[in-house]
Amino acid sequence: MEVPERQPLLSVRDVERSFDVGGQKLRVLKGINLTLEPNQLIMLKGRSGSGKTTLMNLMGGLDRPTEGEIFFQGKPFHAWNDDKRTEIRRKDIGFIFQAYALMPLLSAYENVELSMRMAKKPRSEWKSRVTACLELVGLAKRMHHRPFEMSGGEQQRVAIAKAIAHRPSLLLADEPTAELDSQMAAQVMAVFREIVRTENVTICMTTHDTTIMEVADHVYEMVDGVFVAG
Ligand SMILES: Nc1ncnc2c1ncn2[C@@H]1O[C@H](COP(=O)(O)OP(=O)(O)OP(=O)(O)O)[C@@H](O)[C@H]1O
């Protein structure tokens, strides 16, 4: 009997993205190929302006390529409209940004709970999942603190709990450690490794920090809109 081939989580094929800037075509991505498998920690590095954020936006279904194909769990993101991509994104993708994007008036617990609500998870699952996610990021004792009562590293860990609560299979993180000192950045990376081990998720993150690249399963280097051998 033939064993069915395992489907990649995400596949990016010959992707280009151009923007119209003042009547001129600005080519930002110039033929990107990348495959993400389940349960990986992948990093994208490259100079400012090389196109990393543009690629992450495409991978997360926030934007569509000018040329090429993007399949998320076999679904053709490049061909789907905003509404269809948004539906998949809400359910299956989590995002973390450089600045923590937490609601300032809500506690850590309430911030994470919001993500369960947004993903329309049954209310009966909220409490145990929110608590488990905050424990996973090492903040069980800070659940009822609000963002301004926490350090930058703690806030970023709340943002991680919030991004994984609805059990996405892909977590995209744009410079998640950029605002943190090296000790806090190391804590965030330890949490990422733990999440990849226990949560059935692939993390793809951008970074400039060469010291944290050691923990990646693979590092892609982008130069001027293409990948170069690392
Ligand atoms: N919507 C847009 N319209 C026009 N130009 C854009 C748009 N989005 C990105 N660009 C341009 O594309 C280039 C790549 O930007 P991008 O944000 O992807 O780089 P990056 O590698 O993520 O940089 P950084 O490390 O600074 O975040 C930049 O020159 C940027 O000005």
Image (tube, rainbow, N blue to C red):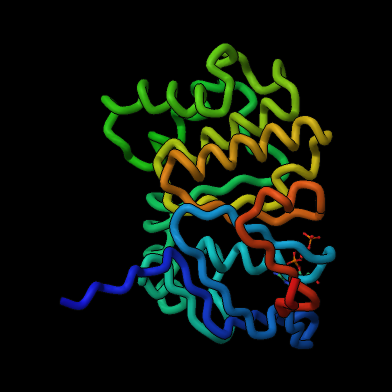
Considering every residue shown, the one lying at the far left of the view is: 1
Q: Nearer the viewer, residue 220 or 105?
A: 220
* Residue drawn at x 66%, y 23% as measured from the top left: 147
Q: Is 79 positioned to the left or the right of 192 in the image?
A: left
Q: Quadrant of ligand 1?
A: bottom right
Name the image quarter holding residue 125.
top left
Residue 154, percent across and down?
Answer: 68, 25
Q: Is 186 positioned to the left or the right of 6 in the image?
A: right
Q: Is 183 positioned to the left or the right of 103 in the image?
A: right
* Residue drawn at x 46%, y 67% as measured from the top left: 10
* Residue drawn at x 47%, y 53% as measured from the top left: 39
Quadrant of the image containing the N terminus: bottom left
Quadrant of the image containing the C terminus: bottom right
Residue 108, percent across and down?
Answer: 56, 22
Vertical order, 133 against 210 (above or below): above
Q: Nearer the viewer, residue 11 or 28?
A: 11
Q: Nearer the viewer, residue 158 or 8?
A: 8
Name the image quarter holding residue 122.
top left
Vertical order, 134 against 171 (above or below): above
The number of discs equals 0
